[in-house]
Image: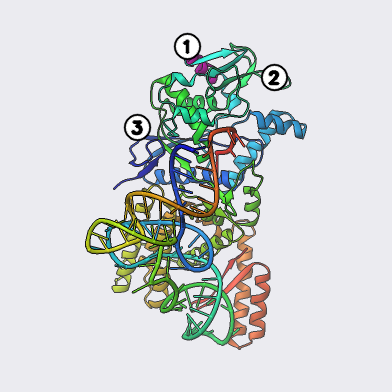
Amino acid sequence: MGLQIYNSLSRKLEDFAPLNAERVTIYNCGPTVYDYIHMGNARTALVTDIIRRYLTHKGYNVKLAQNLTDIDDKIIARAAELGISEKQLAQQRGDAFLEDSLRLGIQPADVHPKATEHIPEMLTLIQRLIDKGAAYVIDGSVYYRVNAFAEYGKLSHRKPEDLLAGARVEIDERKEDPRDFDLWKAAKPGEPTWDSPWGKGRPGWHIECSAMAMKHLGETLDMHVAGEDLLFPHNENEIAQSELATGKPFARYWVHVAFLKIDGRRMGKSERNFILLRDALDNYPTEVIRHFLISAQYRHPLDYNPESLAKSEGALRRLNNCLAALETYQTADAADVEGEAETALRNATLQMKADFQAAMDADFNTARALGAIFTLIGAVNRFIQQTETDAAAVLAHAREALIETCGVLGIYNAQDSDVQDDSGEMLTHLVTLLLDIRQDARQRKDWETSDKIRDRMKELNIEIQDTRQGATWKFIS
RNA sequence: GGUGGCGUAGCCAAGUGGUAAGGCCAGAGUCUGCAAAACUCUUAUGCGUCGGUUCGAUUCCGACCGCCACCUCCA
């Protein structure tokens, strides 16, 4: 069975089949850049990254667009607080967002469209809606006429009555219907504005995603990814605008990422209970944070608490120790004579790859995928422990499989095991020298010298381990 | 009030109509000069509670309890 994805639109698990077999288009609702992103934002961005990696791994050619909302009420308010321009604030926090994403190992999207750079596209789209009778102008503002779109509510599965019942808080009396929403906001004093056929103003929130997605990915997207908080009204409104304008489905698979919680409550900017991604990255390696964020399937809430990253740290240690033990087995070409144990490990490796794929095909079940990986780690460790023969080929085979699957999840960092800078070679020589001296001391049973070298090196973040094949060393953090 | 979701070992988290993956932590042991790593064993007759369907339910149905979220800006 192939990939299945839970579609919020149908509320069912559906077989995945892209519109165009050659290329998969994905749009991800990115952040409003008035502040640094927190772990919750990171979860959605990371899920998007892993979906993209997995589809690429399966052989699809993926085009991903992730927007930055760089003009809205919060940006205006925050910029005023800080005494800088909206543009400066958005530029600075936008750059920080991309930088934080990169630090989390998230590959940049193919395009990162910004709202302020797509005003003409939005104006064109708004005009199309007006022409179709789906929008109306009042005092320089343009509103979307929800009644014009019969399917309004199909994503959030809400009935018109319920929406009306829920509508409250400063309803603009000028609107025809309380559910109608801004496409274009007439200028207010002191705010940034752009020219439009209806006077100076700025775009409403929802229109940017419709305009930018269509411009960069076409009128029908394969996949739309967002946090579940955006399902209503934002995503619902995107559908209303786009589909009424084009007469085509806007997105074929709607993927919604569940909330990251902190001590049982939703982590949110307005709750002021968030952990900034950059702060987490200052305290934990990228792979540890990634492991934590994918330790539950993306549609299930995940709780952040002081222990959660420590647990992932332990799991990553186990993974890295295993990979370090496999490091010398680089090629699977060697034609070993395989005994029972070797065949068993080869089968376990094949099983892991199959389980990994089945897990990821089941709506990107990363928790299950991790289970498959760690099951193989146990088998590899046991094999190394118990088997005398030098089964290079079968171990290299296992190593390749681990690196490949961990690479899809982004929890394997090849650089960890390498000495990176120019002084690396010299450092290697020095460490080797110290290990030689220590080995001599051990031969004399001079444990005092031997332990002193080991302890002092550990203080320098270099950990020595004695094995049957001699001492090994690695950097620790 | 409307809609959706969650409740599995000390903690986190998969999962299936046929008897519970994986990780962390903890205890005991093996290996080692010691350490580290690794390995072995131990840890839910039990999957919120109560009923129902079934030969059989943690898995399906119903009720109830508890928690969370969306309906208003937030990934």
For the residue marked with disc 2, what is the amino acid? Lys
Residue appearing at x 67%, y 68% in the figure:
A460
Asked whether the beta carbons under mark 1 and mark 2 sit within 8 Å of each other, the answer is: no
Q: Is residue A9 left or right of residue A100?
A: left
Give percent across and percent down for residue A54.
41, 46
Q: Is residue A275 above or below residue B28?
A: above
What is the three-letter code of the residue carrying label 1?
Answer: Asp
Task: Provide the secondary structure element on which disc 3 rests.
Answer: loop
Q: Which residue is mark 2?
A: A188
Answer with mark 2 or mark 3, whichever residue precedes in sequence: 3
Quadrant where the C terminus of chain A sits is: bottom right
Q: Main secondary structure of the magenta part?
A: helix
Classify mark 3: residues with Cα within 10 Å, few (<14), some (14-19) or many (20+).
Answer: few
Residue A165 location, x and y as percent?
52, 30
Q: Amino acid at mark 3?
A: Leu
Residues at discs 2 and 3 in contact (Cβ within 8 Å): no
Q: Is residue A159 left or right of residue A178?
A: left
Q: Nearer the viewer, residue A278 or A126?
A: A126
Question: Which mark is in front, 2 or 3?
Answer: 2
Of residues A472 and A34, which is closer to you in this image?
A34
The answer to whether residue A337 of the structure is visible from this angle is: yes
Q: Which residues are magenta?
A: A121-132
Residue B13 x, y percent position in the rendering: 46, 57
Q: Determine the image quadrant of residue A283.
A: bottom right
Residue beneath label 3, please? A19
The chain letter under disc 3 is A
How far apart are the alpha carbons under marks 2 and 3?
Answer: 43 Å
- Residue A389 vs residue A141: left or right? left
Q: Same chain, marks 2 and 3?
A: yes
Chain letter of the residue carrying label 2: A
Q: Which residue is mark 1?
A: A131
Q: Secondary structure at mark 1?
A: helix
